[in-house]
Image (cartoon, rainbow, N blue to C red):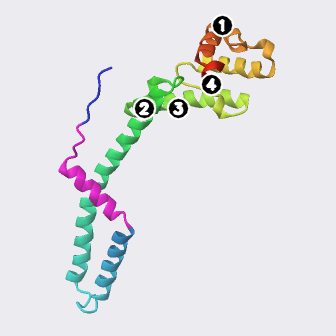
Amino acid sequence: MPLIKLSGHHSIFDRFATLVTRLTGSPWAFSLAVLSVLVWAASGPLFGFSETWQLVINTGTTIITFLMVFLIQQSQNKDSLAIHVKLNELIAAHEWASNRVVAVEDLDENDLATLRSFYCHLAKLAEKEGGIKHTHSLDEAGSVHARKKRVAKSRTDPASAPRDQAKPSRKFRAKAARQRPSKREDA
């Protein structure tokens, strides 16, 4: 697999959007907004509650809201993409996980509904065994389900354990013995 090289550079817009999103989400920004509205409301009698006085707050809030929509959306897109990448890494790294769900966010609504119904079916299988943690993945659901049943049975009845789980192989025991420090090395 080719080595992925990341530039580590962020565009000016990306840095600006991240900064503004962080600042506007702070308690100080909220306090400043409340203070602005209170100052505006208190200045009403001074300006006779005129149309210009009302237009100031309407125009100001409309412009700020309009610009913030784009900045917040950019930050949300970036965060969402980062979360998808992290989840994809977890799926790809797990031995029993189905790699077919790595890019599931790119599927259309019908395909997502099909996958959801499949996982609902897995949950029903798991409930028969006493919990949703007994299910597995899209690709190997049937075989893993059967394997888990065999393992669970072998825990209660060692005679029914599959051969490879009943005792370690000769090869495994020999390798483990080589890795243990000898008594002479300890002395």
Please name the predominant secondary structure of the magenta segment in the image.
Answer: helix
Image location of residue 45, percent across then percent down: 28, 92
First-in-chain label (2 vs 1)? 2
Measured in 3D between alpha carbons, the distance from the residue under mark 2 to the one under mark 1, in whole angstroms, is: 35 Å
Q: Which residue is mark 1?
A: 170
Instruction: Label 1, secondary structure: give it.
Output: helix
Image location of residue 63, percent across then percent down: 22, 65
Label placed on residue 186: 4
Name the mark nearer the viewer: 1 or 3.
1
Image location of residue 14, percent across then percent down: 24, 50
First-in-chain label (2 vs 4)? 2
First-in-chain label (3 vs 4)? 3
Instruction: Label 4, secondary structure: give it.
Output: helix
First-in-chain label (2 vs 3)? 2
Label 1 near label 2: C-beta < 8 Å? no
Q: Which residue is mark 2?
A: 89
Mark 1: give few (<14), some (14-19) or many (20+) Cα within 10 Å. few
What is the magenta range?
7-26
